[in-house]
Amino acid sequence: MDSMLNTLASLPWWAWIIVFLVLVAIRDIFVQKGHTISHNFPVVGHLRYWLESIGPEMRQYFVANNREELPFNRIERGWIYASAKKENNYEGFGTDRDIYAHQHIFVKNQMMAYKLPGNHPNITDPCFLPCAKIIGSYNKRKKPYRPASVINVSAMSFGSLSAAAVNAMNNGVRKSGAYQNTGEGGLAPYHKQGGDVIFHFGTGYFGVRSEDGNFSMDKMKQLVSDNPCIKAIEIKISQGAKPGKGGVLPAAKITHEISEIRGVVMGKDVLSPATHSAFNSVPELMQLIEDIAEQTGLPVGIKGAIGKLDQWEELAKLMIETGKGPDFITVDGGEGGTGAAPPSFADHVSLPWVYGFSSLYKLFKKYDLNERIVFIGSGKLGFPAKAAMAFAMGVDCINVAREAMMSIGCIQAQVCHTNRCPTGIATQSKWLQGGINVPLKSDRLSQYFKTFRKEFLEITHAAGYEHPCQFTMDDIQVNVDDNDLNRSLSSTYGYNKAVVPFSGIEELYNCSYLGGKEYMEK
């Protein structure tokens, strides 16, 4: 035995590499049966799987051109990164975008831009841009809410995102006056860093879940009572990534902390049902909205991806009959988002945002209901020109998810569902999360939001308006096809946006229901 150990100890380093490779080859040929490539090409076959695993990163840096990559191309990511870091986000030598491409957006500028009067709030704060509507005003909720920012963090759960990422985002919205949507994973301690919060729940009722897995009004009342940071409640009907399919949190992502917050067991994938148990029809949904609003005093809204409109029309008719209804509607795009989903769902189920929102808005306009509702858009709208289009179509606020993730360091590795996110944002790995500097990243989210609002205001002023709520469908044109070349949004989608009551940003600044308390007190 001693002589064998001495022999092994005397082997040079390169011999150990050969031994290791021989063992891998034996394993590839004689032991494993799952991979044909590894069997037929032992050792070197592993390179194929390794290269495949880093394919997205390699393509975004070395293969794809500036405007080619999806879901966000290099120019879009670069603008977010530069804006978040307060770096130069300009480009020189003219646009490299094909401005004749299908669906390219043109914002029609006014001959003479809007000029700020001497005492205007945007002179002292060029980033101040609150929502023009008050959520819960029409239905006379006890605690109405006006978001202090037209751009906010969309529904992303603690569990899907790491503790450090949620913490950074909540601190970021606190610093920028925005709100953070909790996603359906419940309210975590990391949501309670001073930022405004929209509490969101889906079919799993995490955070307001009874022992049998159903919705608990008692827990909802207690949650709202204990957490004044919650400004509104959102009921998820469906989400853009996988409408009609329940959410999935892999067992690998479930920590003891997550199991306590969500009220689920460890070691098993958490599969949310595809449908709600708290209601089975539109009238029952309406009743739940009113019950929650009455018990909590908060505005209550719904979130959905848009497909068929028959039940949405039923909701609209019921709102006419009863004089009640949701205080806000968040429209998610079928482009998918941070939620992991089968490609068959992400690619094909529900309408893209522009088609879905225009269909729904037009339906509610037919029943003259638009003034009752605050419309929130969610679907790759975190860029000023896209936001201008969305506001022209009838949106009052926008929510961003992936754009918010990129502002705190996401590199679009597209491994959110694997628990191996290299930036620590979409993983529960303590080691990977350790790379997130929460104070720094919160500053970057805040700066992205402020830069976005500043540029959005500049585009709004160029179009001759004080606030983006004043955009009309005729202020934006899009390329349609080779025959029509380009048309206004009103011609393209067949409706005109309802006029939003607005008498000046000064009035919004002085609103007693304005959120973003710390930001506003600066």
Image: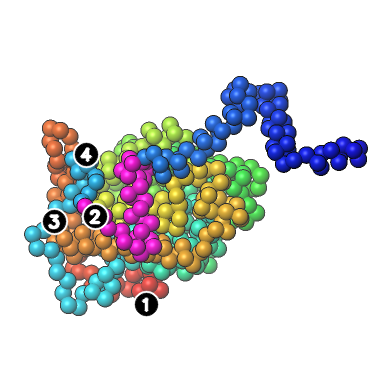
Q: Amino acid at mark 4?
A: Ala
The CA distance from mark 3 to mark 4 is 20 Å
Q: Is residue 169 above or below residue 251?
A: below
Which circle's residue, 4 or 2, is located before the other in the chain? 2
Q: Judge whether residue 86 is colored magenta.
A: yes
**Tag on residue 153?**
none
Q: Which residues are magenta?
A: 65-93
Which circle's residue, 1 or 4, is located before the other in the chain? 4
- Tell me the quarter of the image containing the N terminus: top right
| Residue 6 image offset from top left, x and y in percent | 86, 41
- List the residue tagged with mark 3: 109
Marker count (numbered): 4
Q: Secondary structure at mark 3?
A: loop
Query: Decide: marks 4, 2 in contact (CB < 8 A)?
Result: no
Query: Decide: marks 3, 4 in contact (CB < 8 A)?
Result: no
Residue for point 37% across, 77% down: 521
- List the residue tagged with mark 1: 521
- List the residue tagged with mark 4: 101
Q: Nearer the viewer, residue 201 or 97?
A: 97
- Of badges 1 and 2, nearer the viewer stands 2
Residue for point 72% across, 41% down: 13
Q: Amino acid at mark 2?
A: Gly
The CA distance from mark 1 to mark 3 is 34 Å
- List the residue tagged with mark 2: 92
Q: Amino acid at mark 1?
A: Glu
- Of badges 1 and 4, nearer the viewer stands 4
- Of badges 4 and 2, nearer the viewer stands 2
Q: Amino acid at mark 3?
A: Asn
